[in-house]
Amino acid sequence: MNWIEGKKCSAEDAAAMIQDGDILGVSGFTLAGYPKAVPLALAARAEKLHVAGESFQVTLYAGASTGDSCDGALSRAGALKLRMPYQSNPSLRKGINDGSIRYIDAHLGKMGYLVRTGAVPAPTVAVIEVSAILPDGRVCLSTSGGNSVCYLDMAPKIILELNTRLGESCIGMHDDALPELPPHAKPLPVYSAGDRVGSEFVKIDVNKVIAVVENDAYDEVTPFVEPDDVSRNIGERILDFIRFEESHGRLPKGMAYQSGVGKVANAVLCAMANDERLGRIDLFTEVIQEAVLPLLKKGKLGVASGTALTLSQAAQQEFVQNAADWKKHFVLRQQEVSNSPDIIRRVGVISMNTALEADIFGNVNSSLVCGSAMMNGIGGSADFARNCALGFFLTPSVAKGGAISSIVPYVSHVDHTEHDTQIFVTEQGLADLRGLASEDRARLIIKNCAHPDFREPLTDFLEYGLKHAKGRHLPLALDRAFEMHNRFLETGKML
């Protein structure tokens, strides 16, 4: 009997090996490749202990967000003390915003570095979903890279969840290299989306493995929805602008694309798939979304490099069935590499990320509603926004049926400063902010991106600032900066 058989146990037995106060480093990035059986069993155990009057809470690190069977179940069980670095689960969000769960919102490209350098405590237990375990101690990760290599290396105890449904579909997709730590760190020689510099397997210390649990569960990803008219409009504007820049020699052809999460980002990929003028493209991104599959099927996808393959259940089934042909188009990396500023700059990335709100001076809020209520987090948007060759922030001009303007006098929380943003796009139009001073930016954003219902109050704020702000370089009138937000909190409408 090899070491693998000797470590096999139930999810309940594995959960019993996790202690109150442990720090769990789990696999998973944006609903892909996270452990499913052990967190569910751990949540059930926590609930029983709480009924018996015993305390039980853990800290949870991941790559980004995980599915409801991990983030959601542990949150509802009261089993989470602290979560880092990103989430998107409604139950977890509720706990963060009512103060019962501490949350550290961090740049995704920096999380592994923080752990590896000791800036934050290392995981005490790594719980990692894998698609294959070899007798020599090598494992193949499943549908995400995330921070799994870091957690496997740093944690003194390892629990492996073997997803038997995946078979050999993930073998050959992963590139598990990590950057060297400074000082004098040598660069990873990644120059294009398809470059590989590491191994497709992770070598682990088998003596640290305390349990192997089998599961056959799917990643809990919402089924793909065709883009609406607003999202399609935004996607088409971006492609038109890219073609315009290429035709004027300001943008070299052959750049790789990065696409954030959500229906607007999906719409851009769908527009690419349907554009007959567009040739083959590469992606150098974080999340490889389901909208990439139409590009693949139409022969328009070169290589998609990312740290997660986030597909609905139907698409997961389709991928497993076609993996032998399809997986040569994919590279799954550790997020310290997919989100590396050095590599993003070198590859040359056209970046597209979603904003919660943007202000007339060019600042973007990606994370907090009305300045204090967490939505999801900053994610990896800043990793790309600051280091990309060309960067877009996308948002519909209004939300909640027109009650909220996505373009505001001043954002209620700043994730991306005016220094890191280049181009804003809504269904109303596109504003190229490069080379423009503050007042010129403001007038262009109001004219091209704001909804017609909000252009007058936004212009009024700008004119008031030009007369009453302390300086005209950034005509920000502090006494009126959050009028629209305060009105929304009081009445439910910004107007």
Image (tube, grey):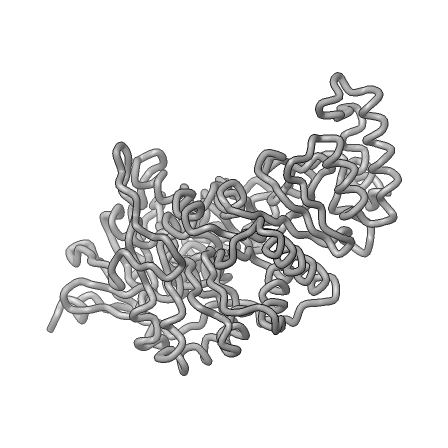
Which residue of the protein is positioned furthest toward the left in this rendering?
1
Question: Can you say whether 471 is above or below 443 in the image?
Answer: above
Q: Residue furthest bottom?
A: 321
Instruction: Please state, as top left, top right, bottom left or bottom right, where the N terminus lies in the image.
Output: bottom left
Q: Nearer the viewer, residue 111 or 59?
A: 111
Image point (70%, 65%), residue name: 232
Q: Position of residue 126 (x, y in %)?
A: 30, 53
* Residue 432 relative to residue 62: left or right: right
Decide which of 157, 77 is in the foreground and name it.
157
- Residue 83 seen anywhere in this rendered image of the structure: no
In the displayed structure, 295 sits above or below 447; it is: below
Q: Could you say where residue 384 lies in the image, as x and y percent from the top left? A: 50, 46
The answer to which image quadrant residue 9 occupies is: bottom left
Name the residue rendered at 39%, 43% in the picture: 342
Residue 251 lies, in percent from the top left, at 55, 51
Task: Look at the picture and state if 304 lies above or below 385.
Answer: below
Q: Quadrant of residue 240?
A: bottom right
Q: At 74% across and 66% down in the image, what residue appears?
A: 229
Q: As rendered, which of 144 and 78 lies closer to the eye?
A: 144
Residue 42 is left or right of residue 206, and the answer is right
Looking at the rendered image, the quarter that the C terminus falls into is top right
User: Is 175 displayed left or right of 454 in the figure?
Assistant: left
Q: Nearer the viewer, residue 43 or 300?
A: 300
- Residue 211 in view (yes/no): yes
The furthest residue to the front: 248
Q: Name which residue lies at 37% across and 63% down.
A: 331
